[in-house]
Image (cartoon, rainbow, N blue to C red):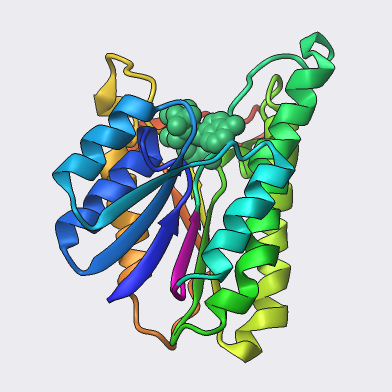
């Protein structure tokens, strides 16, 4: 039975991934949470295959202790770096705390997890690291400078690590969704649903062991931008 680690597994996209994995009944799941205590308890009570661990991913020492515990236990087959934080604000209006929070949670924590868990992942038959990045990487939207910068770093890290570590059997999938309705917005018909994204992550986890899937760029059809620029003759 594959052992899968999902960060931020009690809320939003991470919760949908954990529930999809648990429903498949083929995996053992370790998930982290930080603030979503009640949801973590509720999910663990519903699915015996899911174990939750409370970790502040912005706290480097707490994360190092969590990694040490994992290294002393059983192998991990798949790491899903999902936890992340979105702050949409003009750069100069962000506090320095918000700037560093974006870096710490969206880039430093996944990097620390990849670095720390590689020795354990390499013991698995077909190790896989899935990073939830964002379409922001390609859109370059004003007001998302820090988010775009750190997600670009996360996507790029995986593209280069793929070259370094594919020869040792470690695979990387970068998931780059457009807006996913984890905000409880009333317009689910124009956004990706968390459950839909979770199915794509499951697809990546279930692909044959010898396949390297670089990127899953996903958007809802209504999130396309059909406007032609002025210089295009129609
Ligand atoms: N929603 C979108 O439109 C969208 C689009 C593209 C990419 N993404 C990416 O998808 C991922 C999940 O997004 P989401 O929409 O599901 O976000 P969300 O609903 O806001 O959930 C954020 C997750 O991050 C965890 N988290 C936040 N701060 C933490 C900390 N200090 N320590 C540990 N965990 C912490 C939360 O855990 P607790 O609740 O337990 O604290 C929660 O599980 C993120 O990486 C995000 O950038 C989202």
Q: Is residue 222 above or below residue 211?
A: above
Tag count in the figure?
0
Q: Position of residue 18 (x, y in %)?
A: 31, 49
Residue 197 visible in the current orientation: yes
Which portion, as a residue range, is magenta?
74-80
Q: Is residue 156 left or right of residue 118?
A: right
Q: Residue at x 15, y 43 (%)?
A: 46
Q: Is residue 46 left or right of residue 3?
A: left
Q: Quadrant of the N terminus?
A: bottom left
Q: Is residue 189 above or below residue 7?
A: above
Q: Is residue 44 left or right of residue 120?
A: left
Q: Residue at x 40, y 85 (%)?
A: 209
Q: Residue at x 44, y 74 (%)?
A: 74
Q: Is residue 124 left or right of residue 58?
A: left
Q: Residue at x 20, y 69 (%)?
A: 26
Q: Position of residue 139 (x, y in %)?
A: 63, 37
In reply to whether residue 87 is colored magenta, the answer given is no
Q: Residue furthest top?
A: 93
Q: Is residue 73 above or below residue 29?
A: below
Q: Position of residue 9 (x, y in %)?
A: 39, 43
Q: Quadrant of residue 67?
A: bottom right
Residue 224 visible in the current orientation: no
């Amino acid at each position: 039975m594959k052992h899968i680690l999902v960060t931020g597994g009690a809320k939003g996209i991470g919760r949908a991934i954990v529930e999809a994995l648990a429903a498949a009944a083929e995996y053992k799941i370790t998930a982290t949470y930080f603030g979503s205590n009640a949801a973590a308890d509720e999910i663990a009570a519903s699915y015996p295959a899911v174990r939750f661990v409370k970790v502040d991913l912005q706290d480097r020492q707490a994360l190092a202790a969590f990694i040490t515990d994992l290294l002393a236990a059983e192998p991990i087959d798949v790491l899903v770096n999902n936890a992340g934080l979105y702050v949409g604000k003009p750069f100069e209006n962000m506090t320095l705390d918000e700037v560093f929070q974006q870096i710490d949670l969206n880039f430093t924590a996944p990097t620390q997890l990849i670095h720390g868990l590689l020795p354990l992942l390499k013991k698995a038959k077909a190790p896989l690291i899935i990073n939830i990045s964002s379409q922001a990487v390609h859109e370059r939207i004003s007001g998302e400078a820090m988010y775009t910068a750190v997600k670009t770093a996360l996507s790029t890290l995986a593209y280069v690590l793929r070259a370094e570590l594919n020869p040792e059997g470690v695979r990387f999938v970068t998931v780059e969704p457009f807006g996913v309705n984890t905000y409880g917005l009333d317009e689910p018909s124009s956004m990706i649903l968390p459950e839909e994204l979770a199915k794509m992550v499951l697809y990546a986890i279930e692909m044959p062991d010898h396949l390297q899937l670089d990127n899953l760029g996903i958007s809802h059809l209504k999130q396309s931008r059909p406007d032609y620029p002025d210089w295009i003759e129609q």
